[in-house]
Image (spheres, rainbow, N blue to C red):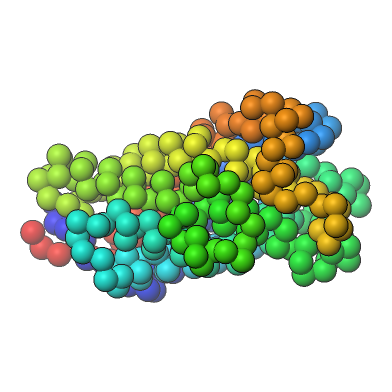
Amino acid sequence: MASRRAPTFADSLIAGGLAGTSVDLLFYPIDSIKTRLQSSQGFSRAGGFRGIYKGVGSVIVGSAPGAAVFFCTYDTLKRTLPTPPHLAPLNHMISASLGEIAACMIRVPTEVIKTRAQTSSYGALADSSLGAAKLLWKAEGIKGFYRGFGITVMREASTILSPVLRILPIVTRKQIPFTSLQFPMYEFFKRRLSLFLYGKPASLHAYEAALCGSVAGGIAAAATTPLDVLKTRVMLDLRDTTHPSYPSPLARLRQIHGSEGVRALFAGVVPRTLWISAGGAVFLGVYEWTISIIRPTNDA
């Protein structure tokens, strides 16, 4: 099988947007269930199995641009960072982490709106994403849309970027950020599987790359569930963040552990792992499939 040429900026933009929209819409019900399981108000009071598509409007708006920004940044840095070949995992870690920081500028506002709509945080006053966004703006202004930004970045981005992230809340050094696990594993699994099946790298079909994405996503999802729980709780908190008694992320993590136990830190781990494992297959599979169509392969 022929090796594929590296995607251009435009290729990453198109393929990333299509991949992000596909996975978020397909697995939205599982995401709603996971969010409600993590809510401090409890699964049933947060909505149970009712209205599992609440808040989907924000996803439709934010998925494509967020994923497109991520892949444009990731693919560009992966090609241009001056790291030697034997440090390829470090290259992938840094590239993916910076890609996530860029994507979070778009993703976090839609995530805040989505989580509040999913859990009916505003009650009957906001039955839609637009209604939740209006109430959020009225109550908290622009800062409200970036509630949990630092925690989301810490969950997604690599700890190797800690000097860049000093201005953001540090949740805990013991947590393993999602992206710094997923993409180095994804690239490693792709390379090993390609060498095993075809005797050379960069030769996988889209469905084979999707399998690698599924395994890498599932492992990373299970390991970073405590950070995801913390992110959900902070985004759902309707209190004024400027209040002097508002707990820090680390204090909030300890509070959850102390009052609710270890189980609470892994609330929703099964649907999250299944969702991201299956979602990783769709997300990265659709991306690789789109790239294979718009980026012709070299002759063997």
Residue 196: % across, % down: 15, 39
Q: Nearer the viewer, residue 140 or 26?
A: 140
Q: Residue at x 62, y 62 (%)?
A: 168
**Residue 284 horizontal side relative to residue 115, left or right:** left
Residue 259: % across, % down: 76, 29
**Residue 274 horizontal side relative to residue 115, left or right:** left
Quadrant assignment, res 167: bottom right
Residue 217: % across, % down: 44, 42
Residue 85: % across, % down: 19, 60
Q: Residue at x 21, y 64 (%)?
A: 84
Q: Residue at x 69, y 49 (%)?
A: 249
Q: Residue at x 42, y 69 (%)?
A: 72
Tell me: residue 64, above or below residue 267.
below
Q: Nearer the viewer, residue 278 or 90?
A: 90
Q: Is residue 129 visible in the rendered structure shown here?
A: yes
**Residue 212 horizontal side relative to residue 283, left or right:** left
Q: Nearer the viewer, residue 162 or 68?
A: 162
Q: Quadrant of the C terminus?
A: bottom left
Q: Is residue 31 visible in the rendered structure shown here?
A: no
